[in-house]
Image: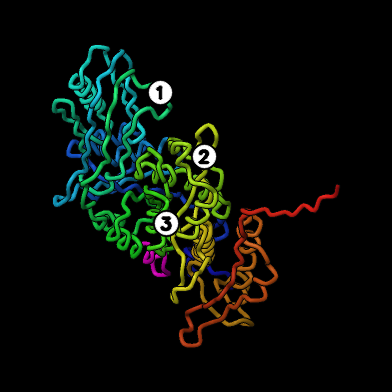
Amino acid sequence: MAISFDSIPASLRTPGAYIEFNNELAGAAGIMHKIVAVGQRLPTGTQVEGEPVRVTDPSQAVSLFGRGSMLALMIAAALGANANTELWAIALDDDAAGQAATTTIEVWAPPTAAGTLMLYIGGSRVKVGIASGDDAAAVATSINAAINADLDLPLTATVSTDTVTLTARHKGDVFNALDIRTNYYAEVMPAGLALTIGTMAGGTSNPDLGPAIDALGDEWFNWIINPYTDTSNLVALETELGDRWGPMRQIGCRAFSAFSGTHAVTGTFGSGRNNEHITCLGTGASPTPTYSAAAINCAVAALSLSIDPARPLQTLTLPGMLAPARHEIWTRQERNLLLYDGISTYTVDRDGTCRLERQITMYQTNSASLADASYLDICTPETLERIRFEQRLLQSQKYPRYKLADDGTAFGVGQAVITPKIWRGELLALYRVLEQRGWVEDYTNYDRLLIVERDSDDRNRLNWRDTPNLVNQARVFAGKQQFIV
């Protein structure tokens, strides 16, 4: 009997037609891409710490993680940018040893006319009604009441005479970057009113990412929204992502972070990291909190990368992200420098729309500490991940229970036997498919350099080395016009 059956025994004597089904040639499979957001919850949330939960609606996140919590705000930002990619979340509690960031708003000149004070906290607008006869204390009381009335804000307020003290709902240094300002859209301040708004400071000790990393287990999440950029958490995340990327686990993913600071501070931060699986958006003076910016960036990138991992993300809009004031927007030269510091950049349209400019990883140097651009763009590890998945799928779907023989073996047609030559043909055929998808190029050299052989020590093992030539992205168009007059 030449054909290898899976279920029909060779010892049948009872008459009948026995037909089994085998899906090895069906080839119908795909990745259900998943994002996981990691962030802090409030005690008012119902979700326990360190347990992944799927989230489909911002109101669900409020119930799970508490209204005004970091994680609820991250989920709202992510779903606002992309409601199609499956989204999970892992809640963390505040570090008991941490401190909450604080600042003050001091009213030092009362209004001379009635009006409305437009206060922006982390990009969220708070309207404060001002009466013409209000003194400084009355204005401060109104500001305090308006802030505490908005339960979705990331901070709370207390008032003493003419000063309002703002305190982040969570502990951690991530909230030191929380932006507080007035009149973002150039609204008019009530006549005579003058305020002094301090900078958020004093927040210490972000939660440890350890419980979230443990909670990931061996589940394949394609992208992680990471709100923390402190060294300890980044090192832990880099270690985990490297392990997930490796050949023993093969469940690689990219983590999206964001960093707020001056150009110099941002460049210094970026140049201190070096990892091909973390991408960090430099937000500059954007009012949008870094944890929300990371969520927006990840959601936007995930939607595009899930469709085509090789297609660049440039020009994609970042819905919900507010631009810096016009005079604070980084120039092209400044952004170009950051792209050499491992920091991803964005541009701002005239109407304030923020668009991705170049999504790079934080990988900058090789093991010899020499400049290395091999993993510069996020499309590189994303495309490699998908190629590996397709090769694994091909083996597991088409050759799950095959025997291995040398080339030239005269086995019967229909036998479940694979040889190096057969597998080489499968890899070449797959490369053609990947070429049609626009993921790779140069089939001729791939064919020439492809090596497939049976292991000389372990005869049950088939080895291969291939050299996929990843398609590149059209990023820079340079022309020279030699005009004639």
* Residue depicted at 43% across the width and 26% down the height: 186
User: Label 1 amino acid?
Assistant: Glu
- For the residue pair 200 and 273, the one nearer the viewer reads as 200
In the image, 138: left or right of 429? left
Residue at the spot 20% in from the left edge and 37% down from the top edge: 167
For disc 1, the marked residue is: 187
Q: CA distance from mark 1 to mark 3?
A: 33 Å
Q: Secondary structure at mark 3?
A: helix
Would you call the spot at circle 1 few (<14 residues within 10 Å), some (14-19), or many (20 or more)? few
Task: Indicate which disc, 2 or 1, sits on the residue closer to the N terminus.
Answer: 1
In this rendering, the label closer to the viewer, 3 or 2: 3
**Left or right of 229 on screen, residue 344:** right
Q: Position of residue 342 (x, y in %)?
A: 45, 59
Report if residue 170 lies within the magenta region: no
Residue 200 visible in the current orientation = yes
What residue do we see at 54% from left, 71% from top?
416
Disc 3: which residue: 267
How far apart are the alpha carbons under marks 2 and 1? Answer: 20 Å
Q: Amino acid at mark 2?
A: Val
